Amino acid sequence: MSDDTILSHLTANVPPGTSTIAWFCLRSKPKHEHIAAERLRRTEQTAASNPRIRFTRSTRIGPAEVTESMFPNYLFARFDWQTSLNRVHYAPGVAGVVHFGSKWPTVPDRAIEEIRTLLGDSGVHVLTNEVAAGDQVTVSGTVFHGLQAIVRQVMPGKQRVMVLMDFLGRQTTVQVGMDSIVRHTLRR
């Protein structure tokens, strides 16, 4: 199908009589959101937004800070769909522009502005790993790696916490370093 045929069959949700430039949701190739966003930013007359989130994840060697896309396999791009659709659709890292048949939904400018306001200039929302008594945690990178526990007491002067865990068939209270636990629920 030629470019002209594709354009004649699609309709973006852009009100008649307004600009054909709008924000669209794009599907990226797996784990390629950042690549797609960077390539689109370098493309003329195209803006891209890839909201990300940074948090602590439990690994065998201990907790590790990771940064991932807030919307895995998705990102947003602002472009003129009549002139740039193919350029955006076939950009490196992009799997396609989200559409439903011949309808190509747009993302309201206000929604993108709100996301950008929440994330700040860096485009990354940072979740802290601070714990309090009663929090559920996973022990990471020690002999107790992978065990679930509940924080009983935080000892900030010692950089340690007292946790209650099921170990060898009974509940046991153990002191572990704050750097060896990862909180389950993410607080804002």
Image (cartoon, grey):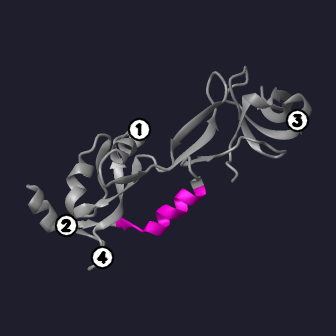
Which image quarter is the C terminus in? bottom right
Q: Which residues are magenta?
A: 106-118
Q: Is residue 22 left or right of residue 180?
A: left
Report the residue marked by disc 3: 156
Q: Nearer the viewer, residue 41 or 32?
A: 41
Residue 159's image quarter? Answer: top right
Q: CA distance from mark 3 to mark 4?
A: 58 Å
Q: CA distance from mark 4 to mark 1?
A: 35 Å
Report the residue marked by disc 1: 31
Residue 5's image quarter? Answer: bottom left
Report the residue marked by disc 2: 10
Q: How many marks?
A: 4
| Residue at x 14% of width, y 67% of height | 9
Viewer-nearest of labels 3 and 4?
Answer: 4
Say whether disc 4 or disc 2 marks the residue closer to the N-terminus. 2
Say whether disc 3 or disc 2 marks the residue closer to the N-terminus. 2
Q: Nearer the viewer, residue 89 or 178?
A: 89
| Residue at x 82% of width, y 45% of height | 132
**Amino acid carrying mark 3 in the image:** Pro
Tell me residue 18's x, y (percent).
30, 76
**Amino acid carrying mark 2 in the image:** Leu
**Amino acid carrying mark 4 in the image:** Thr
Q: CA distance from mark 2 to mark 1?
A: 28 Å
The correct choice, above or below, for 144 with respect to 162 in the image is: above
SS under mark 4: loop
Say whether disc 4 or disc 1 marks the residue closer to the N-terminus. 4
| Residue at x 51% of width, y 41% of height | 68
Say whether disc 2 or disc 1 marks the residue closer to the N-terminus. 2
Residues tagged 3 and 2 counted as in contact (Cβ below 8 A): no
